[in-house]
Image (cartoon, helix red, strand yellow):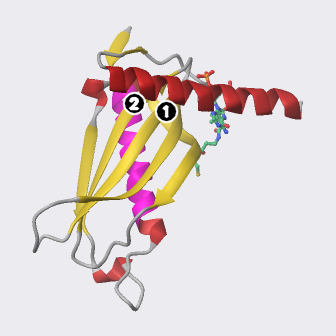
Amino acid sequence: MQKSAAESILIISEVMMPSQANVAGNIHGGEIIKLMDSTAYATARRYARSNVVTARVDELEFHLPIFIGDLVICTGKVIFAGNSSMEIAVTVEVEDLEHEGRQRALSAFFTMVALDKKGRPNKVPELILTSDEDKLAFEQGQLRYESYKTKKRQKK
Ligand SMILES: CC(C)(COP(=O)(O)OP(=O)(O)OC[C@H]1O[C@@H](n2cnc3c(N)ncnc32)[C@H](O)[C@@H]1OP(=O)(O)O)[C@@H](O)C(=O)NCCC(=O)NCCS
């Protein structure tokens, strides 16, 4: 089975509330990471059509602060598919709702593993790449995948 990277895109949005912030009004990093994990989960589950779990997070970066009242737009996209694992690029954009425009606030790569009904790693569909951007993202995801495999072999 094959599925396209472009069609895997999934977006979750949420307005940030005071209970998610510190006393200065900055939203806690963990609140945004949870939203990113939920986005990666939903993107991967819809792609694999099975249960999925988070195995790894690479290159998590906080580019901008997020404040109470901001709209957070979290986008997930499958950029690499192995045998049972998938890499989901998750980006977070922020909009303050009183001004035009969005800015990139966070980004990360989530490795999600598809599981069958017995909790064993399960084959995922092959990823179809239709643009140069998708091909580049796939190659970069493959490098992280191979780097993990090499490190794992070296630990044995
Ligand atoms: C993810 C998990 C199912 C993998 O189990 P495993 O016995 O290591 O399975 P395998 O070695 O066969 O690996 C399965 C796939 O996951 C990938 N994988 C496993 N651990 C990984 C890691 N730490 N980083 C990146 N990829 C990983 C493997 O590369 C492999 O990919 P492939 O099938 O595409 O080649 C298992 O480690 C687990 O259940 N972890 C906890 C997950 C969880 O609970 N997450 C929520 C956090 S609270």
Asked whether mark 1 and ligand 1 are closer than 8 Å, the reply comes as no
**Element type at marker 2?**
strand
**Quarter of the rendered structure image containing ligand 1:** top right
Q: Position of residue 41 (x, y in %)?
A: 42, 42
Q: Residue at x 40, y 52 (%)?
A: 36
Q: Quick one: 45 or 131, which is closer to the camera?
A: 131
Q: Residue at x 36, y 10 (%)?
A: 2
Between discs 1 and 2, the one toward the N terminus: 2
Q: Is residue 124 magenta?
A: no
Q: Which residues are magenta?
A: 32-47
Identity of the residue furthest to the top in this view: 1
Above or below for 107 versus 123: below
What secondary structure characterizes most of the magenta part?
Answer: helix
- Considering the image in quadrants, where does the N terminus appear? top left
Tag 2: residue type? Val
Asked whether mark 2 and ligand 1 are closer than 8 Å, the reply comes as no
Above or below for 21 versus 127: below
Q: Residue at x 78, y 32 (%)?
A: 152
The residue pinned by badge 2 equals 78
> Image check: 131 left or right of 30?
left
The residue pinned by badge 1 equals 87
The part of the image, by quadrant, that contains residue 64 is bottom left
Residues at marks 1 and 2, CA–CA distance in whole angstroms: 6 Å
Q: Position of residue 114 (x, y in %)?
A: 51, 28
Q: Quick one: 60 or 34, which is closer to the camera?
A: 60
Q: Residue at x 56, y 17 (%)?
A: 83
